[in-house]
Amino acid sequence: MESLRQPNPQPNGAEAPDADRNLAGAAPAPQPARKSSGIGLWLRDLLISAAASVLIITFLYQPVRVEGTSMLPRLEDHDRLFINKFVYRFSAIERGDVVVFHYPRDAEKSYIKRVIAVPGDRIRIDRGQVWLNSRRLREPYVPAMYQDTRSMAEIVVPDDEYFVMGDHRSISSDSREFGPVDRSLIYGKAVFVYWPMSDAGVVR
């Protein structure tokens, strides 16, 4: 907001100093053009904002769209969300993370699943119930209506690989089918759903 500077009043009858006196009929002193400088500042701010957005999207966050229903109920088909592509350069992939990775059987496709087991974990599935390191895994993100009855013999997750599963167990194609996912294929962590607004929120 611009502020207006008020002139200093002079006592009645007092004359302004010669340096400030305006001659009758004299044209006012030319004022510097502000319009062009204002446009220049606006363009500068726009370019800085655009560059910052490109850097953030390129190196930190990337918008993606969910295709399919294997991560119901949290992620629905056509939900749009941001994934963090930078976080795993500084922190480890943890159990429970929802990750995005290149499909092991076709690197041109991307999948989104939840990490259930990390390297060195022993995992088995008994009629839909996951056992991790000899303990029954509590999975509040899998509603009863999305559970299934599939079983899998115990395996030890290899080094630099991760066992992933969809929350909608009865329809998900995941590590039960294609095996653990190599670390090199995982390129992001799902962070925040931004559209539609009814689904907006942190991904957990």
Image (cartoon, helix red, strand yellow):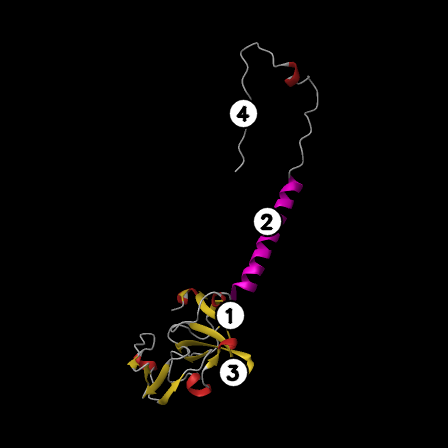
The residue sitting at 45% across, 79% down in the picture is 159
The numbered dot on residue 6 is 4
Q: Find the distance from the CA under tag 3 to the CA under tag 1.
A: 19 Å
Magenta region includes residue 56:
yes
Magenta region includes residue 73:
no
Q: Find the distance from the CA under tag 4 to the CA under tag 2.
A: 31 Å
Upstream in sequence: badge 1 or badge 4: 4
What is the three-letter code of the residue carrying label 4?
Gln
Upstream in sequence: badge 3 or badge 1: 1
Q: Secondary structure beneath disc 2? A: helix
Image location of residue 192, percent across then percent down: 44, 65
Whether tag 3 and tag 1 are in contact, CB under 8 A, the answer is no
The vertical placement of 86 against 7, above or below, is below
Q: Which residue is mark 1?
A: 64
Upstream in sequence: badge 3 or badge 4: 4
Q: Find the distance from the CA under tag 2 to the CA under tag 1.
A: 27 Å
Where, by quadrant of the figure, is residue 99 drawn?
bottom left
- Badge nearest the viewer, 3 or 4: 3
Q: Secondary structure beneath disc 3? A: loop
- Crowding around mark 3 (Cα neighbors within 10 Å: few <14, some 14 to 19, many 20+) is some
Q: Which residue is mark 2?
A: 45
Q: Extreme top residue here?
A: 13
Q: Extreme right residue here?
A: 26
